[in-house]
Image (cartoon, rainbow, N blue to C red):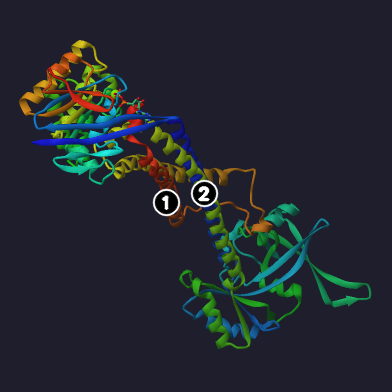
Amino acid sequence: MRFSFVFMVLGIVLSVGILSAGLNLFAGYERTLKAVLLDSFAHISISETDSYLSRHKADQLIPKLEAMPEVQSVSPTETFSAMVNKDGEVHGALIRGYDFKRPFPYRKYIRKGEPSLDSGSVYIGHYMASELGLEVGDSLKVVYPQLNRVSALGIFPGEYFFRVAGIYRSGYYEYDRSAVIMTLEDAINVIMVPGYISNIELKLKPESVGAAGKLAKELEATYPELVAQAWTQNNDSLFRLIAMEKWLIFIIFSFLVLIAGLNVVSAVVTIMYDKKNEIAVLKTLGAGLNSIRGLIFYRIALVGIAAIILGQIFGWILSLLIINQSWYSLKGDVYFIDQLTIYVSPFNQVAIFVVSACLILICVRLPLRRINRMEIIELIRNP
Amino acid sequence: MTILEARHLAKSYQDSDRRIEVLKDANLLVNKGDLICITGKSGCGKSTLLHMLGLLDNPDQGKVLIEGKEVSSSSKEAPQIRNRDLGFVFQFHYLVEDLTAVENVALPLLIAGHSKSTSLAKAAELLSGFGLEERLNHYSNQLSGGEQQRVSLARALINKPKVVLADEPTGNLDPEKSAEIWETILRLNRELEQAFVVITHDREQARLASITYELEHGVLSPVNP
Ligand SMILES: Nc1ncnc2c1ncn2[C@@H]1O[C@H](COP(=O)(O)OP(=O)(O)O)[C@@H](O)[C@H]1O
Ligand SMILES: [Mg+2]
């Protein structure tokens, strides 16, 4: 009896632990990804329908945008793709020019170096820095092919040298690999479109972030010649996919708990046969079948519930171990972020508890129905 | 006043190719204050009869009446009748091993729905009356055979049943312990008019009963003292 009981408890603890660890990790991923995307993207990006935005127009627009109650900061930006080159090694780059006379919305991601940029200096992504072997203070060549400098020998790319003034690391893998952040004027210089910017980035106040989509629509209604894109527009399907995957994990790992339930069934059967004399005595003394079943059910169920809670604690420890190990990390180019984090969501924990408890209790209940088939006479005759 | 009555009980078992008729036409009347002994050869069907009287098994034919009312072991009220109106003592004491002596005795009260504290208090009182006040919190494997059987007897009596059914209660005890149990039964019968149906092999014991029956060929017949 002890033996099957130990396996029953072990099975529950392990299966609930794996279910719980899986969900902790997945919820952590979802939360971190959401936070990273929320922080590393403009909440609303405003641009001209199919051309650059004139600085004149932007200057008129910015004060109006800043006056909106939902808006936290407004940044005119110049964003384009280019290449960087260090000692012959070429690397794709996403150039992002910001006006450093205004508050820089991504300051918290500058992990090393100077707090602000001057003309001629750049922040570069953490992975770009490590791949190219760049440190703060090194110099970097930005290469941008310019169509207006076409000659008989081909396209002459414009080449510009910058000093690395800091390292950018947001957790969003794509940016950490390719971002080169410079002043707005430098960026305009590189692509040579003076008087124009590519877009205006809006950061919303935390309480208004959820309403980004609605706000973008309102902006488009007010300024029909502009395009306003909310961050949710790009990521909606991603989050829906993640939510669905979370449910799949939940359902698949719940089957583990069901398998642990089989152990419970066999433990209950063993206990019933172990205690058949006692059951016979109780029947003889007039105990109803339901009260005998209740007696056994209550004791095993209590152990089962305790094992579920233990499993949830084990799951938490397991997920802590997983995020603190060093031999596996997420592939940033597949999963957008490369850091494993956990989030012990109260909702998930309650769901795990309720689903596991239901499964386990059914598995305790099921074999107890056999008790009325265990004849008292047989038991009393054959002690 | 008739407490328990068996009318024309018949029971047979199919034993591989052969049918064994254990009981053919067993009749029995138990009145208040009776001490009835049933004797008979081993395997003649005494236990089978007792199980039917105790509503633990159904006869093939005939009926069992308690205070004039027919009841069957499979009926809804059978558990309640076993709990309130009948007491059981078996040859093997059948105490619940996980429970102490006092808890075992309290079981019928607990099953009847009394509170734990009153059940345990009553059980302790009764056990003390049986000279077991030192053994209340012992588990059954910490008790001697005689003590275990006295605990069983106390458990059979705790709900003040109309009749106690005992199947060779002294069959496993040495003569001294056996006499002790038997004296207790006689005393309860005399002082409280407690009715007993006792299956025994012991002729000496049977001689002290108010009525003795012998079970032979499936029929109960009175033995003249
Ligand atoms: N379930 C059963 N199946 C077949 N035979 C049985 C069964 N129960 C009892 N018997 C038989 O019935 C007879 C009477 O048994 P029992 O009442 O225990 O006798 P006693 O108690 O007088 O020694 C025995 O021969 C026994 O083998
Ligand atoms: Mg017998």
Task: Say if labels 1 and 2 share a chain.
Answer: yes
Residue at 48%, 71% in the rendered image: A205
Q: Which residue is mark 1?
A: A358
Q: Amino acid at mark 1?
A: Cys
Residue at 57%, 71% in the rendered image: A232
Q: Is residue A227 above or below residue B53?
A: below
User: Considering the image in quadrants, where does the N terminus of chain A appear?
Assistant: top left
Counting from the top left corner in percent of width and height, residue A328 is at 64, 46
Ligand 2: give its quadrant.
top left
Counting from the top left corner in percent of width and height, residue B157 is at 15, 30
Q: Which residue is mark 2?
A: A19
Q: Camera-side residue: B190 or A340?
A: B190
Count of numbered labels shown in the rendering: 2
Tell me the subunit letter for badge 1: A
Q: Camera-side residue: B222 or B136?
A: B222
Q: Quadrant of residue B181?
A: top left
Closer to us: mark 1 or mark 2? 1
Mark 2 falls on what kind of element? helix
Q: Is mark 1 within 8 Å of ligand 1?
A: no
Crowding around mark 2 (Cα neighbors within 10 Å: few <14, some 14 to 19, many 20+) is: many
Q: Amino acid at mark 2?
A: Leu
Question: Is any part of residue A305 visible from this angle?
Answer: no
Residue situated furthest left in the rendering: B191
